[in-house]
Image (spheres, grey):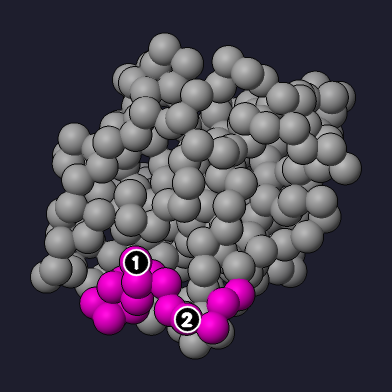
Amino acid sequence: MRYAKERPATYLMTALLATLLSLGGMAAAQAAEFSYNGDTGPAYWWELDGEWAACAGDSVDAAQSPINISKTKFDKSLKKLELVTYPTTIDIFNNGHTIEQRYEDTGSTIYFNGVSYELAQFHFHTLSEHVVDSRHALMEMHLVFSEPGGTNLVIGQLFGPARGNNQFIQKLIDAGLPQKDGDETITTDLIDVGDGLVNTNSYYTYSGSLTTPPCSEVVTWVVLKKHGVLSKEQFQAFRRILGNNFRPVQDQNGREVTATWDHKQ
């Protein structure tokens, strides 16, 4: 009788321990979270998850982003961006790291270097992630395009200070920027992200990575030369929510940055 009682108890304890270990492993996997400061900031991203090793950027051939854009090479083969965007309602979502506008299934595309990419979302960073001649802009918008092969093209639009409002940015603010992680807003007015871009004739381009974990080096970057305008009040509306959500610049490691015009330091 004693053995009959102890055996189920032992079995149950073993099963319970296995379950707890399994749940602990799941919790650890789910707990891999990043931020922009402290022990979960950019310097430690590579330690937080085994799949984020690329974030270390410590190899001599690492191709991480963002970078400081200074010396570039004029490439006469670069043309005006073949970009098509359509107005649509947008789901504005606060994911705890940025304010992301989901822009899927609209038919908005870009054709670049023989590859067609479809727009998936756009989001914001304050201050800018890319710097030009070692100077940050107030804010940077990233338009994230993808293609079935798994590569991405991201357009970076920088914004600088101005007295007047940016009408595109104001539409997003008027819709109600989600204040906390998990909050979302669906716009009632149609919004065309193309209205937020300034002069797609002039840009820098280089090969790089995602600027958030897992930092995969699968991105063609297109950073527009001309800054969009941004009033102090508009900047503060985003900064109050985002804080400093920019990754520091990464080593260029000999990568070439080409441009549609001559840019020399």
Which is nearer the eye, 100 or 50? 100
Decide if residue 223 is on the left or right side of residue 3.
Answer: right
Decide if residue 137 is on the left or right side of residue 10.
Answer: right
Q: Secondary structure at mark 1?
A: helix
What span is colored magenta in the figure?
Answer: 161-176
Whether residue 9 is visible to the viewer of this picture, yes or no, is no
Residue at left 28%, top 73%? 171
On the image, numbered disc 1 is attached to which residue? 168
Residue 254 lies, with reference to residue 104, above or below; the image says: above
Say which amino acid is labelled 1: Phe
Say which amino acid is labelled 2: Gly
Q: Residues within 10 Å of mark 2 (few under 14, many from 20)?
A: few
Horizontal and vertical percent position of residue 99 = 41, 65
Horizontal and vertical percent position of residue 59 = 83, 27
Residue at left 42%, top 72%? 166
Residue 129 lies, with reference to residue 245, above or below; the image says: above
Decide if residue 45 is on the left or right side of residue 34.
Answer: right
Q: Confirm whether the magenta stretch covers residue 34.
A: no
Horizontal and vertical percent position of residue 66 = 68, 45
